[in-house]
Structure formats: structure tokens, C-alpha cells
Amino acid sequence: MQALLVARGAAQQHLKDVLESTAAIAFMGTPHIGSAKADWATPLTRLSNVLRKTNSEIVQVLKPGSEMLANLQQEFHTLLDDRSRNQKKTMDMFCFFEELPVVGVGKIVPDHSAILSACPNRSIRANHMQMTKFSGANDAGYVAVSDQLWLWVDALQKEAEAAAKAASVSPVSVEEIRERRNRRLGTMQDVVSGSQHFASVNSGGGPVFQGNQSAGRDFNVGMSSR
């Protein structure tokens, strides 16, 4: 979410393109409204600081009732509303949530926090740490996620094909061009033959068509009385 918000306000075009190119999001155990287990993660975060650089502030943000997390959610939904209203573009979303608890701890992200209202969702039979670590292509979790991704890809391809078809003009075949030309030449055969023909609708006279053999592509149309 934060990445898309940054992309929206960025001055660089390649960052703006990140938002423009995002058509769908699969959330994997995302704590949209925080997790009570953030307190449990604090000592582990401090311990990991000894081994590698981490940001302990992230843990604080993920606590339930976090003002920063609430603001992030609000800004993200505002982004979605603006995109839908001004650009007529939607962003599909799907929420995957952990089905199994961590032994001795419980579920890291509760279902009500991992699932956005009005968004389709599905559980993955794994705990929070293992739900994105698939054993292979036959793993039930992998199948669930990949199936959803392919649904989005297929829908986008059909949308792109429909847009391209609507924007393109059907080419005229050579045979059709020749047929159109022959029809025109047939109606003007006498005109380009070099003779003159006079036709009158009534006694008051009518149109005169004059043709010149030496100038086969030019002819004059005039009005004359007999």
C-alpha cells in the first residue's frame, strides 16, 4: 500500500508508472487493522538488531489502534476512489489469510484484520510464517494463489484485446478497393469516353456532362439549357 501511495506523489515518471501499471493486489496475511501479536514480536525484533539492521518502528505501526496504520488505510482507499472516479480504472484485490496458528503463540494476524470488507478471500493452510513458502507447484497454497493471479492475467488480456479491436479500423481489402473503383467507373463510363451527353429533367433543361478523352481523370459537370 505504502509503495503505491509513494508512487502517486512521486515526481519521477518511472515511479508514477508503478501505480499506473498496478491492476490487482494479492494480500498475503496483511494486518490491515493491526495485530495483537505485534507486542510479541518486539523482543524478537530487538534480538535481530544484533544480527542485522531492522526497523523496530514497523512493529509499533502494526499494533491495533495504530494511528499511522489507520492513516495508511484511509489514504489507500482514497487513492482507490480517485482512480475509479477520475480514471475509470479499478484495482482488483484478494485477501489470503493464515489458517493455522503458530505453536505456542496463536494466529499472528487474525482473520478480521487480514480480510478487507467486500474483498474476496481465502485461507491458506499454513501459519503466518509458512503461508508464502510453497513446497512446489502442487502445493494447495501455491495452486490457490497462482489460480487467482491467472484469473487476473486472463481478464487483463481480454480487456486489452477488446480495447485494441475497438480502437482499430478494419483494413479494406484490395478486392474491395477494385470493386468500389469499378462501380464508380461504371457510372461515369460515358463521361470519360470523350462524348457529350445532354439530359433534361423537363423542358427547362437539365445537367450536362462533358468528358474529354485526352484527360481521362478530369471531367466537368455543368448546367446548360437546350
Image (tube, rainbow, N blue to C red):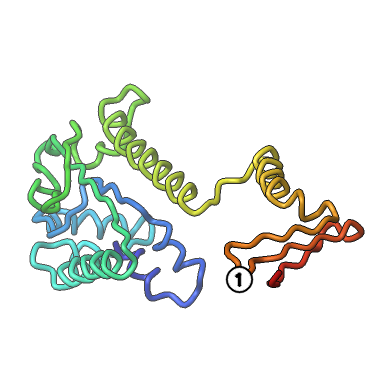
Tell me where residue 132 appears, x and y as whole percent: 30, 39
Tell me where residue 27 appears, x and y as whole percent: 25, 49
Residue furthest front in the image: 203
Tell me where residue 97 appears, x and y as whole percent: 17, 42
Q: Residue at x 18, y 61 (%)?
A: 62
In the displayed structure, does residue 177 sit left or right of residue 89? right
Q: Residue at x 18, y 70 (%)?
A: 74
Q: Mark 1 sits on what residue?
A: 204
- Is residue 56 visible in the rendered image? The answer is no
Q: Secondary structure at mark 1?
A: loop
In the image, residue 160 sits, relative to residue 200, either above or below, namely above
Give the image quarter of residue 133. top left
Residue furthest top in the image: 138
In the displayed structure, does residue 120 sit left or right of residue 10? left
Task: Give the position of the N terminus as an image quadrant.
Answer: bottom left
Residue furthest right in the image: 214
In the displayed structure, does residue 78 sit left or right of residue 182? left
In the image, residue 24 sits, relative to residue 220, either above or below, namely above
* Nearest the eye: 193 or 30: 193
Give the image quarter of residue 22. bottom left
* Nearest the eye: 135 or 195: 195
Task: Give the position of the C terminus as an image quadrant.
Answer: bottom right
In the image, residue 179 sits, relative to residue 17, either above or below, namely above
Tell me where residue 177 appears, x and y as whole percent: 68, 44
* Nearest the eye: 212 or 52: 212
* Nearest the eye: 142 or 116: 116
Q: Residue at x 9, y 48 (%)?
A: 110
Q: How many marks?
A: 1
Q: Amino acid at mark 1?
A: Gly
Q: Residues within 10 Å of mark 1 (few under 14, many from 20)?
A: few
Q: Residue at x 13, y 35 (%)?
A: 100
In the displayed structure, does residue 176 sit left or right of residue 62? right
